[in-house]
Image (spheres, coloured by chain):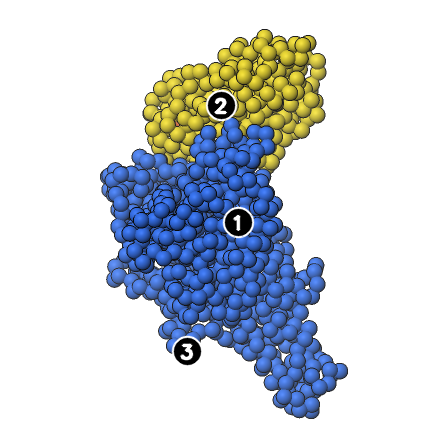
Chain colours: A blue, B yellow
Amino acid sequence: MTIVDTRMKHGNASDGLLGGRLARVDGPAKITGAADYAMEYFPEGMVYAVIIDSTIASGRVVALDTAAAEACPGVLLVLTPDNALPIRTATGWMGEPPPPVPYDPLAREITFAGQHIAAVIAETFEQATAAAALVKATYEETTPISSFDDPRSGEGNPVDMMTMEWGDAEAALVTAPVQIEQEYRTPREYNVPIEPHGLIAHWEGDMLTLWEPSQWIDGMSRAYAEWFGIPFENVRMRSPYIGGGFGSKAFPTRYGAVAAIAAKMLDRPVKLAVTRPQTFTAFGGRPATRQTIALGATREGKLLSIVHKGANETSMNDVVVEPLGSVTSIMYATPNFSSRQNIVPVNTVKPGPLRAPGENPSAFGIECAIDELAYEVGIDPLDIRLLNYAEEDPHAKKPWSTRRLREAYAAGAEAFGWAKRSPGVRSMREGRQLVGYGVAAGTYPVRRTPGEAMVRILSNGTIEVASSSIDMGQGTYTILAQTAAEAIGVPVETVVVKLGDSSLPRAPVAGGSQLANLMTGAVHKAALAARDELIGLAINDPNSPFRDLQANTLTIEGGQISSPRDTGSALGIAEVMRRTGRERIEALRNTLPEELQDEKERFRNYTTISTMLSPTEGDYSLHSWCVHFVEVRVDADFGTVRVARMVSALDSGRLYNPKLAESQWKGGIIMGIGQALLEEGLVDPRNGHVMNNNLGDYLVPTNADIPDLQVISVGVPDTHASVLGGKAVGELAIVGVGPAIANAVYHATGIRVRDLPITLEKLI
Amino acid sequence: MRDFSYLRANSFEEASSAAAMPATMLLAGGTTLIDLAKCGVTNPERLVDITHLDGFDAVTVDAEGASIGALAKMSRVAADPSILENFPAVSEALWQAASAQIRNMATIGGNLLQRTRCAYFRDPASFPACNKRVPGSGCSAMEGVNRGHAVLGTSQACIATYPGDLAAALVAFDAIVHLGGRKVAIDDFFLLPGATPHQEHAIQPGEMITAITIPASVAARHSTYLKVRDRQSYEFAAASAAVGIELEADRETIRDIRIGLGGVATKPWRARAVENALRGKVLEPDIVKSASRLAVEGAIAHGGNHYKIELAPRVVERAILKSGALA
Ligand SMILES: Cc1cc2nc3c(=O)[nH]c(=O)nc-3n(C[C@H](O)[C@H](O)[C@H](O)COP(=O)(O)OP(=O)(O)OC[C@H]3O[C@@H](n4cnc5c(N)ncnc54)[C@H](O)[C@@H]3O)c2cc1C
Ligand code: SF4
């Protein structure tokens, strides 16, 4: 169990309350190396598994020669589809019942390069690695479709669910005085968190313990339980710290099943660490996307119609939709709108979520297109956004709960000095550097799933918060401590937070930027209940010094209980606990609605996403908003783009801890800069291999690529969005960075790059 | 297990005789070697650790020029004040190479012998065809992802780029590679791929690089290294140029000019055609521009790397103007 003590060496006491700038409480452990990540456990008798991947992208494994590997010293097992312990298919993440077929984590039929076909388990990692190299696969290869640029992939399959329409978009487009139409593209992008994926699987009888970095302990535990047909309670997953996930550590994986099968077959704990190259194929990143956007407008730039068609790559046997119309449909007011989406099956690993799936590429399309329209009609890119400002959700036709985008435009423009922009392209330069200003907006929905938390008041006055939710760097440990401190009325130092263990009260997925809002809600509720019980104890217990006061309530402040009538009577919590002889006060509370309170529904709530509310469920449309202002310098000769300056103004509602929220925003912006200028999975068209499957060749930004980033919060508490008034933070800020940079590059150079990343050859 | 034997050499003689044994590789900083061993590209039976040899890491500069021991670390050479003063392009090339961690580990000898970043070369399991790895097996890059591949010095057999920065500067200033007693001019030390891309340099079995010397020159004193790359740090060159200039007393006529190119050729590339076109000419932007085009005479692109033919002359041009301003 990971317990993070809340220590506050710097800052003042109010930092510990909600809204305070408390530094990450897990920071010292991480900086000193004391933080124990899941893969850093060494259970007695542990052995090592190494996965063998297919080298072809399409076809069949006709033979696996394992003899040489089996003869290697230390080798305990060469796992193949033929000898693997059969397991069942698990319930899907939406709660869809599993088909009654076995689940084969090792493949015979190959649909992408890098598919797991076998595994070697040996006493040491080196032995397993060496033996794995000796397993010889014979394939029957068919020609793969390596990307949706292969003409054989065609237009793909329509996803009717994604169609959105109002008015008559096609008709309004052809009669519009101004019409523009372009295609926008984003490449495959990968999660590559610094902590690699992997797990340790350890069976004791039919109890399975997993040490595995996870964004969703309860969802993943359920899969393990169902694979092996054991009760959910028999799976213990431990995930104390997570070194980044960005969406990639939320779901059960095939290699996870392999490790658990091997551990069961050998009756030894098995460690399986995914290699860096495998982080490009053992799970998927953001699929490649393309979208055509046609805008019809008046000569003044007022939108009359948006016609949008999008497509994303998916894997051969899976339906993965990257919702490309998600921002297109809500950013601007338009009387006529149509959006459709196809998915194009290609020989790739099943794509997965990567920070702001959907919103991110969607915004790249519409936010570039609106910029193009601004130049077309000759008005300022900021003005065109205000001219077409959506006063309500144009799709759901509901009022926004809060939309402080206008305030964001104003605050960002002011801080950036947007007014100094000269309108013409290529009109600003410094020596050989072309200077460009660009702007683009972004948004991310508020997703809501109920949560659960335990708050304990211990006899020594310590407050304990427990939840199976996780902290992957976003600050869960910290803000939950702040929430409990504020709700009970104690200094934050007295709060201890336990997370990342399936034996703790349950939590839904740490994804969709929902965790902070739902967990602060649950902890707040549990903490208030614990506080009430403490006060009840102090008022009613025969041994309590407060009993004689006959007060109907007491106050708790700074860890001191006192009567409002007699403030001189203050006593510490520990003292009250001692005098009343109580060991602990315990409050387990959830935020589930009545209809989800029974055990089955509660289980469904935490182990699937089927209870997650959409942002437009209810009377309001709930979203976070942001705008990015960027100055780029483009070398006129070399085409290299450098981001010189960036100001972003963001509306995430109330910030529980501005320091952590700003850090999340900046992280998103940095990732956005990488997406705009660097990141791209380079796929060999002949065999579907990702050629740059390592951090030397798959470029993410270095410090030198990132200027000082200014972020401005323009949010106000939004209690329609969440109990305590926060909206989405984590995934918001990456949305809109790509188009802001592309727009700035256009302003600098007069060259419109519509396919990311904006590499130098596109500008020379 | 892939076992290998490890020998720590305590003397130059011990290192040389060990290096003469078959399937033996010298281990310096290990930043190339270990990386490639993990990729399954190199599979030595014997590693001879030369990092404990005494006396091979000195950096000295005198009137004759610089001598840099093969075991000197990249970071130390980059920061050496006399290198900085007399061979600024060498210091700049090193500063802009790799990352701080790698520069602290890696040696000058190892740096010269770093291998190409061709992704096909680095992935034998998925791409059996690579003439550099397995002579005669073919070249996977020709029709593959080749954005980073060479446009100069290529052959039918191989288009892999020589990735190093330092060597581009060394080739400009006629450095000499010392292999114990034998000396080889750096331009001859690196071989063109031709039909034998697996042979990359002139080292014979049993030889090791002991030092690099760089003759002093006015051009080297007035030199610069310009590296254009996708990201601003920790990234190989898309195109780079080391340029040094010596002007006549009139302060405008070019007496001597040296140009080395990186990131665009199969070996550290000397742009002699540009040098010849400019020697004796006035250092003037238009003249420099048209001469710089000669840098890519005979260049051949293979699709993804076409931009390098446009980019390289622009880098040369800017670097000439920059070093001209120093001269
Ligand atoms: C991610 C990454 C990015 C990089 N970026 C750059 C870059 O931008 N620019 C750049 O220039 N370089 C770059 N490098 C390459 C780096 O500079 C080289 O790996 C390093 O210089 C090699 O030195 P070493 O001492 O570690 O050599 P080793 O790995 O120890 O040896 C390399 C080779 O040289 C042989 N060898 C070593 N010393 C001798 C000797 N004295 N005599 C004979 N043979 C010898 C070894 O046997 C081996 O074959 C990068 C490397 C990595 C991994
Ligand atoms: S370019 Fe050279 S190194 Fe690359 S695959 Fe071809 S032969 Fe091998």
Query: Which residue shows up at 37% across the image and 25% down it?
Result: B302
Circle 3 crowding by C-alpha within 10 Å: few under 14, some 14–19, many from 20: few
Mark number for residue B312? Answer: 2
Chain of the residue where label 3 is placed in the rendered structure: A
Circle 2 crowding by C-alpha within 10 Å: few under 14, some 14–19, many from 20: many
Q: Position of residue A1 (x, y in %)?
A: 54, 63
Q: Judging from the image, what secondary structure is the residue with disc 1 in?
A: strand
Circle 1 crowding by C-alpha within 10 Å: few under 14, some 14–19, many from 20: many
Query: Which residue shows up at 58% across the image and 46% down it?
Result: A419
**Cβ of mark 3 under 8 A from ligand 1:** no
Q: Taking B294 as reference, is A600 left or right? A: left
Q: Which residue is mark 3?
A: A594
Please check whether the numbered discs 2 and 3 fall on a single chain.
no
Q: Position of residue A737 (x, y in %)?
A: 49, 47
Q: Which residue is mark 1?
A: A628
In the image, what residue type sits under mark 2? Answer: Ala
Tell me: residue A145, above or below residue A351.
above
Q: How far is disc 3 from disc 1 in space, using C-alphas?
A: 41 Å
